[in-house]
Image (cartoon, rainbow, N blue to C red):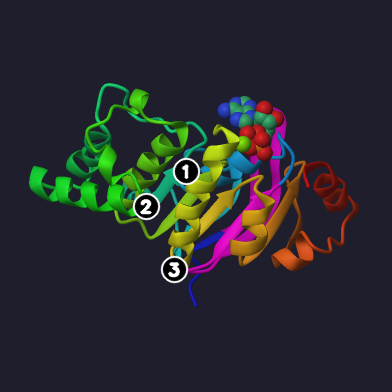
Amino acid sequence: MTHAIELRDLHKYFGRNQVLTGIDMTVDPGQVVCVIGPSGSGKSTLLRCVNLLERPTKGKVFVEGAEVTDPDVDIDAVRRRIGMVFQQFNLFPHMTALENVMIAQRRVLKRGRKEAEIVARENLEKVGVGDKCDALPGQLSGGQQQRVAIARALAMNPDLMLFDEPTSALDPELVGDVLTVMRKLAEEGMTMLVVTHEMGFAREVADRVVFMDGGVVVEDGVPAQVIGDPRQERTRLFLHRVL
Ligand code: ADP
Ligand code: MG
């Protein structure tokens, strides 16, 4: 079977600072893989290497079997298959929720206004903010804004989704709504690579949990093992701090 994502011996330097050291990782179609680890361990950089927002210094990235680190690859075509959700929602402040979900469909996929609007409404409905189509981001809670951002990504019909700490900027009472949407996506079979500090989500939803520290994968296994019964001392120490 072709992996949805495969990272092979990935290295990344920023100047002389080595941030990723020989990362090997796979995500299979329909799987949810959660990446956990301390701040600065390279989690965001790893995620950004998947769609080449960062270019790896060495090593290969494959998406659905195609090597995206091949210099001849059409990276825009690859990125179109990958949805990304960030900690900061990055919505356009002067556009309504509906317009925010329509714009990339129009510009990138060249969908007509009618179709883009139908798809936008469907996806806003799906993430539970169907009644907020005409609201500006500033009129929405953080949790609602993040759900609009998820709808925006879904409207592009991605094959896989990358989430970089999607709930870390939210007030605690708003985290649950966003996790509920992500859980639903997972149940529908979306392939997801999720950087998160939400251990409950990782434990219940992830097929695998990857613990990173210092730019390396320290542990990679099922949640019950990595979170429930970690083999490595470094994993234990980290979990002790966050649980
Ligand atoms: P995490 O997401 O696990 O907190 P990051 O991937 O954001 O970790 O960062 C890992 C390391 O890489 C940090 O030391 C950070 O300062 C450094 N880093 C990240 N992005 C850049 C960048 N664009 N330029 C220089 N250094 C960076
Ligand atoms: Mg990060």
Relative image position of residue 48 (x, y in whole percent): 52, 42
Mark with earlier residue (3, 1): 1
Of the pair 14 and 28, the residue shown nearer to us: 28
Relative image position of residue 146 (x, y in whole percent): 43, 38
**Dot 3: within a 10 Å radius of its alpha carbon, few (fewer than 14), some, or many (20 or more) residues?**
some
Q: Which mark is residue 35?
A: none
**Dot 1: within a 10 Å radius of its alpha carbon, few (fewer than 14), some, or many (20 or more) residues?**
some
Residue type at mark 3? Gly
How much space separates mark 2 and mark 1, taking CA atoms? 9 Å
Residue picked out by circle 2: 78
Label 3 residue SS? loop
Q: Which mark is residue 52?
A: 1
How much space separates mark 2 and mark 3, taking CA atoms? 20 Å
Which is more foreground, mark 3 or mark 1? Answer: 3
Relative image position of residue 239 (x, y in whole percent): 81, 49
The residue sitting at 56% across, 51% down in the picture is: 194
Of the pair 104 and 62, the residue shown nearer to us: 104
Relative image position of residue 162 (x, y in whole percent): 49, 49
Q: Height in image: 5 above or below 216?
A: below
Examine the image and state in which quarter residue 64 appears. Answer: bottom left
Residue picked out by circle 3: 189
**Ligand 1: does it lie within 8 Å of the C-beta at label 1?**
no
Q: Which residues are magenta?
A: 7-36
